[in-house]
Image (tube, rainbow, N blue to C red):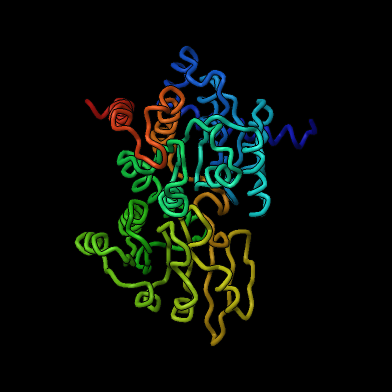
Amino acid sequence: MSDAAQELVESGRRRIDWIRSRMPLLAAARAEFAGTRPFAGRRIGMSLHLEPKTAVLLETLAAGGAEIVATGNHGSTQDDIVAVLRADGITVFGSRADSLEQHHANVGGVLDARPDILLDNGGDLVAGVLGRGVQNTILGGTEETTSGGDRLRGELAGRVPFPVIVINDSLLKAIGENRHAVGQSVVESFMRLTNLMIPGRRFVVVGYGWCGRGVAQYLRALGGRVAVAEIDEIRAFEAALDGYRVDTVENLAPWGDVFITATGRPDVLGATVFPRLRDGAVLANCGHFPWEIDVESLKAQATTVHALDDAIERIDLGNGRHVILLANGRMMNLAGREPKGNSLESMDLGFLLQVLSLERVAAASASLNPGAQPVPEDIDREIARRMLAAMEAHR
């Protein structure tokens, strides 16, 4: 191994050591699994953000006897973490510089290993399995995020013959990770990427699901003036009662200084909105897929595009107006500069949901219904008890 490669591994290990020391729920599961070995003889295929917290998740699964074949999600892979995992004998495909085409090839590499269980994020593995017609080899799996759950219940509905536990359906995850951790990390990432102040600035949060709620809450807590664009009447009603200005994206376009999408849906900021944006508006996305902002249409309208740094682009639209695009429309808290993602505590909780749900699939997949389904209630409640104990909230 070259000196540069060795330094990459050592850098990654230092980061993982810090993360591991602050994830007590996974530490307890890792110790338990070393004795029970629930994944012995099983191969887990994974497509999930490859960053330090994910490495601790994979250590926990490996302690339970799992053989792991993994790739990341497009644009969020951290190369030092890949280097550590490979040095530890885990088969990992991908790098941060991969194109979307290469990402799909990486997903294919995971499926070529013929896993028994899937750990998916965005539905790419499940879609790949169905496209190949090899689903009879899969016991079941988990899906991490809202966007993947939408795919399972949308384009893939009725076609998945094995159980997929949607971690994002857990109310525990919605509260702990989506609202509070995503809310915190997105606002932190916006400040780190742009160095702009929050107080007094006008923000439009597009989507008022759990992630949108959290983003809006943390922006307002820091002094931001926040409006919400939401097409679902019930969520829009909730946002209004929570004290936010509520309107359509089109009507809010001339008002907002910063737009943050959190819907999981394509083109929520699209061609009809861009001409209405005020000069200097900042566009950012925190959804899983890089499709919520129609970047292709935005750049097609541009007279010039300037890369100001590796995470900020200035897009001139003519008539003296320009907009700023962050992280090329990808998930800015993981794809942007110096990615940190969600808090350690929230991911300790979220990844324990993953671990115990995968254990349920390995032990009792025949008792589960095919297709997308929520985390079993007994798992939710057990993790809530463990998290409260870890927080010493019982005192």
Q: Quadrant of residue 15?
A: top right
On the image, the x and y values in percent for residue 100 come to 64, 54
Q: Say if residue 226 shows up in the picture.
A: no
144 vs 311, left or right, is left
Q: Eyeballing the image, is 326 above or below 46?
A: below
Which of the image's four quarters has the N terminus? top right
Name the residue located 62 percent from the left edge and 38 percent from the top edge: 111
- In the image, 76 versus 300, the foreground residue is 300
382 vs 146, left or right, is left
Q: Eyeballing the image, is 360 above or below 237?
A: above
Which of the image's four quarters has the C terminus? top left
Name the residue located 78 percent from the left edge and 33 percent from the top edge: 3
Q: Eyeballing the image, is 262 above or below 158?
A: below
Q: Say if residue 31 shows up in the picture.
A: yes
On the image, the x and y values in percent for residue 78 come to 61, 43
Q: In which quarter of the image is residue 253?
A: bottom left
- In the image, 239 versus 39, the foreground residue is 39
Name the residue located 54 percent from the left edge and 77 percent from the top edge: 322
- In the image, 189 versus 38, the foreground residue is 38
On the image, the x and y values in percent for residue 194 come to 51, 61
On the image, the x and y values in percent for residue 286 come to 46, 55
- Residue lying furthest left: 241
Name the residue located 52 percent from the left edge and 25 percent from the top edge: 61
- Residue lying furthest right: 2
